[in-house]
């Protein structure tokens, strides 16, 4: 599938998760997007899954302690000045679960975008707002590029008899990764200037014709938004 319809479909699913009003609907969308992310290679998918599911889990755990909503009290804790009594009620848990599923669905949609889409082809397919599309593509390519650089640094260290272990060992990679990202940004700017980015009458690579999947993806994106507004 071409990247533009696929990006539209993922955007539609994320929008449906934001518009949905029922926990079961948002959880189903998150489960579908999780399956899509799980089909990616293990070495690439785990940072995205940890970030998405970890942030959603943290939201679920912390929300009942920062809200004060009526309902059946499951746990009552100490009384803190200004904050009040810490407790966990049924209403707070249901709201925390709903918001956690919503955050997971949106995060997994962007994870699938970063894992599966060809961002270079997405920029080429943009007939309008190319600068905005390029900025989004470069931002989403940051994590995969850092992953490749980190893997190369670890292999180089292992070749020299050094095994980076633990948090301190991995933290030592931050300095060369930062230097490499700055060098890559300069190289990218020089390559864009050499290829005439932003000049009129720019040339493009020929794009393949649309098949059946591309219109279906666009229709699915619109349908997901409509269903999210009316029924989910």
Image (cartoon, grey):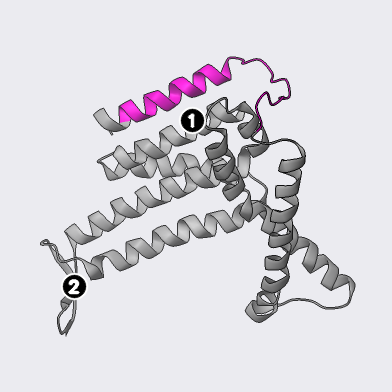
Q: Residue at x 42, y 44 (%)?
A: 30
Q: Residues within 10 Å of mark 2 (few under 14, many from 20)?
A: some
User: Who is closer to the viewer here, 177 or 46?
Assistant: 177
Q: Quadrant of the C terminus?
A: top left
- Res. 178 in view: yes
Residue 166 coordinates in the image, percent (x, y):
66, 78
Q: Which mark is residue 87?
A: 2
- Res. 39 in view: no
Q: Residues within 10 Å of mark 1 (few under 14, many from 20)?
A: some
Q: Residue furthest front?
A: 200
User: Who is closer to the viewer here, 38 or 183?
Assistant: 183
Q: Which residue is labeled 1 in the image?
A: 8
Up the image or down, 161 lies above or below 199; here it is: below
Q: Residue furthest right?
A: 160
Q: Is residue 38 left or right of residue 157?
A: left
Q: Quadrant of the N terminus?
A: top right
Q: Which residues are magenta?
A: 199-227
Q: What SS does tag 1 mark?
A: helix
As measured in the structure, the alpha-carbon distance from the residue carrying label 1 to the one carrying label 2 is 42 Å
Q: Is residue 213 magenta?
A: yes
Dividing the picture into quadrants, the one containing residue 165 is bottom right
Residue 129 coordinates in the image, percent (x, y):
52, 32
Q: What SS does tag 2 mark?
A: strand
Q: Residue at x 72, y 20 (%)?
A: 206
């Amino acid at each position: 599938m071409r990247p533009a319809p696929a990006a539209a479909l993922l955007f539609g699913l994320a929008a449906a998760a934001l518009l949905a009003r029922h926990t079961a609907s948002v959880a189903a969308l998150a489960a579908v997007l999780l399956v899509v992310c799980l089909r990616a290679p293990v070495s690439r998918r785990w940072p995205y899954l940890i970030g998405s599911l970890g942030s959603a889990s943290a939201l679920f755990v912390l929300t009942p302690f920062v809200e004060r909503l009526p309902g059946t009290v499951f746990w009552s804790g100490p009384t803190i000045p200004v904050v009040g009594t810490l407790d966990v009620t049924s209403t707070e848990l249901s709201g925390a679960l709903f918001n956690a599923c919503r955050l997971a669905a949106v995060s997994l949609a962007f994870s699938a975008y970063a894992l599966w889409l060809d961002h270079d082809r997405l920029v080429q397919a943009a007939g309008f707002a190319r600068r905005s599309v390029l900025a989004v593509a470069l931002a989403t390519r940051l994590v995969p590029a850092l992953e490749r650089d980190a893997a190369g640094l670890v292999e180089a260290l292992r070749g020299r008899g050094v095994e980076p272990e633990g948090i301190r060992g991995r933290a030592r990679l931050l300095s060369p990764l930062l230097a490499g990202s700055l060098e890559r940004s300069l190289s990218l700017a020089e390559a864009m200037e050499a290829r005439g980015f932003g000049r009129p009458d720019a040339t493009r690579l020929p794009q393949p014709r649309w098949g059946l999947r591309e219109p279906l993806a666009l229709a699915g994106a619109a349908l997901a938004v409509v269903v999210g507004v009316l029924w989910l």
